[in-house]
Amino acid sequence: MLVVEEFRGTQVTQQQVEMVERKGTGHPDQICDCIMDSISVALSQAYLSEFGTILHHNIDKGLLAAGRVDLRFGGGEVIEPMELTIGDRATFTLGGKEIPVHDIAVDAARGWISRNLRHVDPERHVRYRLKLAPGSLELTDIFARPGAVRGANDTSAAVGYYPLSPTERAVLTLERELNSGRFKTLFPETGEDVKVMGLRNGTELDLTVAMPLLAGGIDSERDYFERKHAVEMEMRHFLERGCRGFERVRVHYNTLDQAGRGLAGVYLSLLGTSAEDADSGQVGRGNRVNGLIPIGRPIGTEAAAGKNPMSHVGKIYNVLSHRMAREICKSVAGVQGAYVMLLSRIGEPVDRPQMANAQLVMEPRRSVAEVEGEVREVMQRQLTGITEFCSALARGDFPVC
């Protein structure tokens, strides 16, 4: 069922206060999401290669337990490595053929770490604990049933929206800049564990940033605060160049720091992530699939990372709802913004949601009745193409973390 209606709430840009968070590449929660999804992609490709189809799996339970390090100005040592638990369900055999699920999972995890965390050695700094088992008979049978489109393996709802607000764009853009190749070349002493919290109050934007400096590149407390100042000034210049639409933008960087307290008063890291010693991570506690944690927007409760890309609507609908909202706004004249909600019923084909609801923010003097037909066509087109969309998810074409 498709229902198109007017959005009757107060748009987030018209509210006095807006709060938006983003957890960056090296944040423990983000690490868990990204690794579990990379494992799902690797398993999907292995199943396709061996059997010509993607089999049942859900690698959406993961925990990164923090290790221990001994820090000092100028360096330090890893005392106890981090431990990554990779859990839930996968298909290990079919027709007498075995798939080395554990090896694929660990290789994918190590590969992601190598590509994204410059100072973490995936062999020495991380232990791997596998808690994967075969799936239940009924859920596994979804993949043996006839039909080009899989049945949903859960009754679940998701919501997406477009466009991003100026606050959301500022938070997303700043974190991406801080973890960009350009910035890391300019400031190689900065770690990947970035967190940005944005607060808009009226027309003023206040950004609080946490990002460690690497102990190996900092010789003293004085050196720390000098480098910190240089990093903060570069942030300010970046925001001045690219952050538009606010009367005032302020940035606050590593605000727990306190001069005169030595190592206890500075945010240092040996490996660039707080998972080395201070903070553990878990799947589903990081960003939504659009890269943000938008307080004040409707958000679903499903963790998309690691879920099966062919049958699990917790992944499929989370990503698709945002794509639908974007396509509606881009292709239908008169629509300023859109919220899309999708609801599955377990066992029903994923291209036939129980409910697909679009709530539209219209331009002045335009009505929903004028565009309802076009919006329905966009939504139906996206649902009709869901098989290729799911295949793209399986290839990792649409990142969820």
Image (cartoon, rainbow, N blue to C red):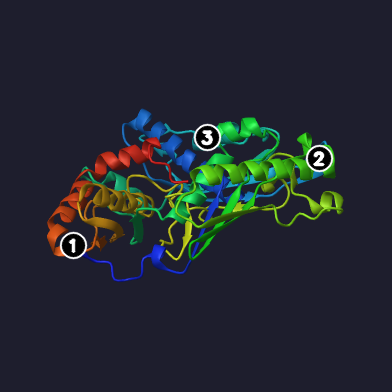
SS label for mark 2? helix
Residue at x 12% of width, y 56% of height: 373
- Which one is nearer the viewer's eye here, 232 or 55? 232
Q: Is residue 85 visible?
A: yes
- Residue tagged by mark 3? 108
79 displayed left or right of 285: right
Residue that numbered label 2 is attached to: 223
In which quadrant is the N terminus drawn? bottom left
Q: Quadrant of residue 248?
A: bottom right
Residue on which disc 1 sits: 366
**Mark 1–mark 3 distance (CA, rounded to whole Å):** 49 Å
Q: Position of residue 52 (x, y in %)?
A: 31, 31
* Percent x, y of residue 389: 29, 41
First in sequence, mark 1 or 2: give its number. Answer: 2
Give the distance between the C-alpha atoms of the residues marked 2 and 3, in whole angstroms.
37 Å
Which amino acid, by three-letter code, is at mark 2? Answer: Asp
Residue type for callout 3: Ala
Return the residue nearer the eye: 154 or 201.
201
Query: Could you classify mark 2 by the number of other residues whose Cα lies within 10 Å: few (under 14), some (14-19), or many (20 or more)?
Result: few
Counting residues from the start of the chain, the first of labels 2 and 3 encountered is 3
Q: Would you say residue 81 is visible in this rendering?
A: no
CA–CA distance in space, label 1 to label 2 = 58 Å
Labels 2, 3: front one: 2
Q: Residue at x 45, y 66 (%)?
A: 296
